[in-house]
Amino acid sequence: MHMRGLISKKHTKKNNISKMEEVKANIIRLLQTELGDKNRVAPYRDKVLINISKADFEHRLGTLLQRVYRLIEQHHPERPDHLGIVIRDEDARHENVFKIWKSV
């Protein structure tokens, strides 16, 4: 009986990972559409990468982060795991990493 509990937990964790990958892919498509052509959105390791211009990074980072957070909360309020967001300037000299916590 003890083994059955271990298998069940392992299976549940695997399902959460695949569900999160699906949610992450949907979020990437959403952000690509909503943020426009000048910003590149792509998967990056286990996170979502948003490349923006140096000027936007220096002057509009906070506004962009708020918009990203609102879009994710509005369109994907149920998330099985935390979501990492990396916002990087186009020269890859500066970046900030943020975490959007999973649903409770």
Image (cartoon, rainbow, N blue to C red):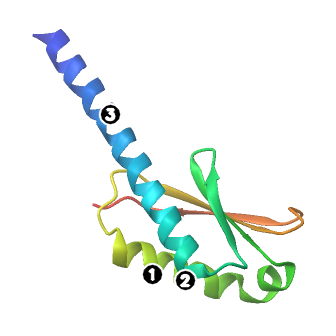
The residue to which callout 2 is attached is 66
Residue 78 percent across, percent down from the top left = 29, 63
* Along the line of sight, the residue nearer the viewer: 56 or 2: 56
Judge left or right: residue 11 versus residue 100.
left
Mark 3 → mark 2, Cα distance in angstroms: 30 Å
Q: Secondary structure at mark 3?
A: helix
Counting residues from the start of the chain, the first of labels 3 and 2 encountered is 3
- Left or right, 53 with reference to 11: right
**Quick one: SS at disc 1?**
helix
Residue closest to the eye, 43 or 103: 43
**Where is mark 1, residue-wise?**
70
Residue extending furthest toward the left: 1
Q: Are marks 1 and 2 in contact (CB under 8 Å)?
A: yes
Residue 55: x and y in percent read 85, 85
Task: Name which residue lies at 89% across and 63% down.
Answer: 93
Residue identifier under label 3: 13
In the rendered image, the vertical position of residue 25 relative to residue 7, given as above or below: below
Q: Earlier in the sequence, mark 1 or mark 3?
A: 3
